[in-house]
Image: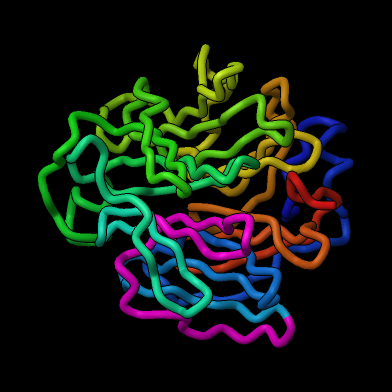
């Protein structure tokens, strides 16, 4: 069985036929939030129900516990200083791992009300942090602490770490989840996993144009998931969108065409580009960590 689902010649140019999907580790309950840390030549990711962060050493292949307990982390990214930014279900906040090894809370409220449970986060070139805030960390005790929401909905927010100002940017989704910018930051892509709460709803990804004021506008459907739900999403340097699904990784050209994918034997939760050349796709899927080398690079890599 091939590791690839080739639907368009554009996808064939993004892969190496000889590169195989590698199963790097297993032993989690629901793994999520991979982030590549170049300075450490390592990948850090979450095992949410086990309330721990794990670390894959790219040089040795060893896997170790990075931190536990950790506040039921979900998504991660790096800021412009190379510090890990985390979405915490347990603390219902976005936090930062500072150089002294301590976690600093960046935001846990909007207009005086506690956030639901931040899920995924991306950093803009201006240093602002954009994050999604569905209720998964407070829906049950499995991925956090069950609680009633303070806010009326699940939205996407922007945090200015310099001033602490928080603005609500996207309010037309049921459960906003994974998000990413196009390479030129003229578009914002957001996955909606609202099917977990709304019967009959499809797994969706929406795209928004970024206007002159830096706000997302003209939200519209970009794609529907071919299997299960979209969760984590990433853009490559050419603007293709790599999305996690119930059957693997689905890849979309900037025009929305589903051009291909990578078949994975577990439900994929998230993914990120890593390695010195950012051409190694790391994939978190249910209990395991996978990777595969690509003829594609992360957006922003030089």
Q: Residue at x 40, y 68 (%)?
A: 47
Circle count: 0
Residue 63, compared with residue 138, is above or below; it is below
Magenta span contains residue 120: no
Q: Position of residue 113 (x, y in %)?
A: 18, 40
Q: Residue at x 40, y 40 (%)?
A: 132
User: Is 196 left, or right, of 131 in this rendering?
Assistant: left
Q: Position of residue 192 (x, y in %)?
A: 42, 32
Magenta span contains residue 62: yes
Picture quarter containing residue 293?
bottom right
User: Is 106 left, or right, of 244 in this rendering?
Assistant: left
Farthest residue toward the top? 218
Picture quarter containing residue 177?
top left
In-front residue for pair 165/37: 165
Q: Position of residue 34 (x, y in %)?
A: 55, 61
Q: Residue at x 10, y 44 (%)?
A: 148
Residue 204, compared with residue 272, is above or below; it is above
Which residue range is magenta in the image?
Answer: 59-87
In-front residue for pair 98/149: 98
Q: Quadrant of the N terminus?
A: bottom right
Farthest residue toward the left? 148
């Amino acid at each position: 069985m091939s590791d690839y689902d080739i639907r368009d010649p554009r996808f064939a140019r993004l892969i190496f036929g000889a590169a195989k999907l590698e199963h790097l580790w297993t032993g989690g309950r629901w793994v999520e939030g991979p982030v590549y840390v170049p300075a450490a030549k390592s990948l850090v990711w979450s095992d949410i129900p086990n309330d721990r962060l794990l670390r894959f050493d790219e040089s040795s292949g060893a896997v170790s516990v990075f931190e536990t307990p950790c506040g039921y982390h979900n998504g991660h990214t790096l800021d412009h200083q190379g510090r890990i930014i985390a979405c915490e279900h347990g603390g219902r906040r976005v936090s930062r791992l500072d150089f002294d090894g301590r976690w600093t809370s960046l935001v846990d409220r909007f207009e005086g009300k506690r956030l639901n449970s931040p899920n995924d986060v991306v950093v803009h070139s201006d240093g602002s942090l954009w994050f999604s805030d569905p209720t998964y960390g407070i829906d049950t005790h499995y991925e956090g602490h069950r609680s009633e929401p303070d806010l009326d909905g699940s939205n996407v927010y922007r945090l200015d770490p310099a001033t602490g100002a928080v603005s609500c940017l996207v309010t037309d989704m049921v459960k906003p989840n994974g998000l990413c910018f196009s390479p030129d930051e003229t578009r914002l892509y957001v996955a909606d996993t609202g099917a977990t709460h709304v019967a009959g709803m499809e797994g969706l990804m929406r795209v928004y144009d970024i206007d002159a004021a830096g706000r997302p506008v003209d939200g519209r459907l970009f794609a529907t998931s071919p299997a299960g739900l979209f969760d984590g999403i990433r853009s490559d340097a050419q603007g293709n969108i790599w999305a996690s699904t119930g059957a693997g990784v689905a890849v979309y050209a900037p025009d929305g065409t589903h051009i291909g994918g990578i078949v994975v034997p577990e439900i994929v939760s998230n993914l990120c580009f890593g390695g010195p050349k950012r051409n190694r796709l790391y994939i978190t899927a249910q209990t395991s960590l996978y990777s595969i080398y690509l003829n594609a690079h992360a957006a922003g890599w030089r």
